[in-house]
Image: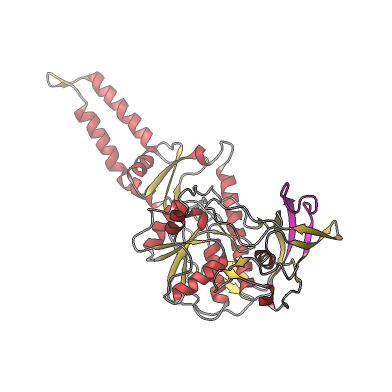
Amino acid sequence: MRGRYPRVRSGRARLRGRVSHVSARVYLYLPKVLGKVWEIILFSRLVVHDGQVAKGTLRSGTAFAVASVIALVTPGAYLVESAGPAIDTVGEIDGVKLVDISGAETYPTESNYYMTTVSAAGNPDVGVPGALAAVALLDKNSQLLPIRALYPRTYTAAEDEAQNEAAMQDSQTVAADVAAELAGQPVRMKLTVTGALEGGPAAGKLAAGDVLTSLSVPGSAAGNAPSTEPGGESGTAGAAADGAQPGATKSVETTSFLQMAKLLAQTAPGTPVQVGYLREGEPGEATIVTSAYNPDPSGWVKPGSQLGIGVTVSDVESPVQAKYAVEDIGGPSAGLMFTLAIYDELTPGSLAGKATIAGTGTMSFNGEVGPIGGIQHKLRGAAAEGATDFFAPALNCPETVDWEPEGMNVWAVRNIQEAIAAATQIGAGQRPQLPTCRELVEAAPHVPDAPPADDASPVADAE
């Protein structure tokens, strides 16, 4: 992909390479702009006395022209963002598959899943020239941003590049592992506690460094909380649905974040659960009374209950490997679309039929879709590829209202299960059982904008 696309970022990540299309427009018209500046200064500002141009005026005009030229070409303190390319994650780049899957049987698909990007000019070290900043101010599809509003003075372009590359690699790893597990592949991982919420259910019972080994929930408590499963509706999902006898204790080995999250989503708040762990190699068990989740900024409360701990994932074992032909694009925000593409190719048929779906959002090992940056630009990039359905993180919805391209439905997505179900329904010609972003915001009109989340690692989460 190097050299074919402008400088892009999937979230707030930049692509090293050629300047953006905004820059290209500036450099195309820059000679004309400079010519006009010179013409105006020399011919409209000069004073003529008895047929002679005043020498002082000529000198001042020349100085002003030189200063103007310098201001136009000198890097300033701003970045310029605009819509970047939308790229089909089940497609090819120069004859090479964007995502090449090995280790398991794959199936052809007629569905299209476009990851969306933001084209950016400038970096934490050097801003755009004054001419580019001026053009961006007049271009409704470009956004001029102060560098210091995004980055501290000590933050360098090299650090930004390294962070964004790492975030993209993490998102690719998480996408492949989550998709493989949802497709029925045997995926195992180590879940390590990063800390317990102060005053939370696990405070004083679990500590940073504990390795989780098991989770057991009384049968009378499991299944009393609503949850959403792939291809299904929100409702009550009991332990018996997984083959357990009604009333029997439901237990899982905590070698899967998805499975642990699924069981907690079925567990009512206030339930005493047994958590097995290893602390410095020694086994232990703690009884923890779960609590309800706090409402998110939209007022939505996650189904089920929580332990009140942070968890990080390591030592993932999966038969499925994914090789990505994605060069020079950084950031984690393509995680959702990568996951959909890989899941579709690991399962028979075309998940979304012949539909073209675009979207954005980070992906976590527990299946949650996280907020990103630049979504307004990404909507325009998706529209340019003809997408009529766009999956947006629910927490980004306030930023999409009144920015929806004509004819495009922007759906509010909270987790990969919802996205899979919605893609299936779109492919069948049905309306997804999700609210649009506009519907979500209108139902909760005081929703604040989502905080920037592009730098968040998808390998750590809370439960």
Count of marks placed on residues:
0
Q: Is residue 54 magenta?
A: no
Q: Nearer the viewer, residue 378 or 304?
A: 304
Quarter of image, res 213: bottom right
Is 273 on the left-hand or right-hand side of 262?
right
Q: Residue at point 73% right, 78% down?
A: 245
Residue drawn at 45 percent across, 67 percent down: 357
Q: Is residue 1 visible?
A: no
Magenta segment includes 208: yes
Q: Name the spot of residue 49 as percent of width and height, x first.
A: 15, 18
Display coloring: secondary structure
Give the residue drawn at x 38%, y 48%: 142
> Residue 155 appears at what percent x and percent y?
58, 40
Q: Which residues are magenta?
A: 188-213
Residue at point 51%, 37% (across, down): 148
Asked if residue 428 can be seen in this view, the reply is yes
Camera-side residue of 26 and 204: 204
Quarter holding residue 345:
bottom right
Q: Image quadrant for the C terminus?
A: bottom right
Given residues 376 and 320, the one toward you in this image is 376
For this orientation, the residue located farthest to the right is 282
Q: Which x, y percent locates residue 434?
A: 48, 65
The image shows residue 265 at horizontal and vertical percentages of: 65, 64
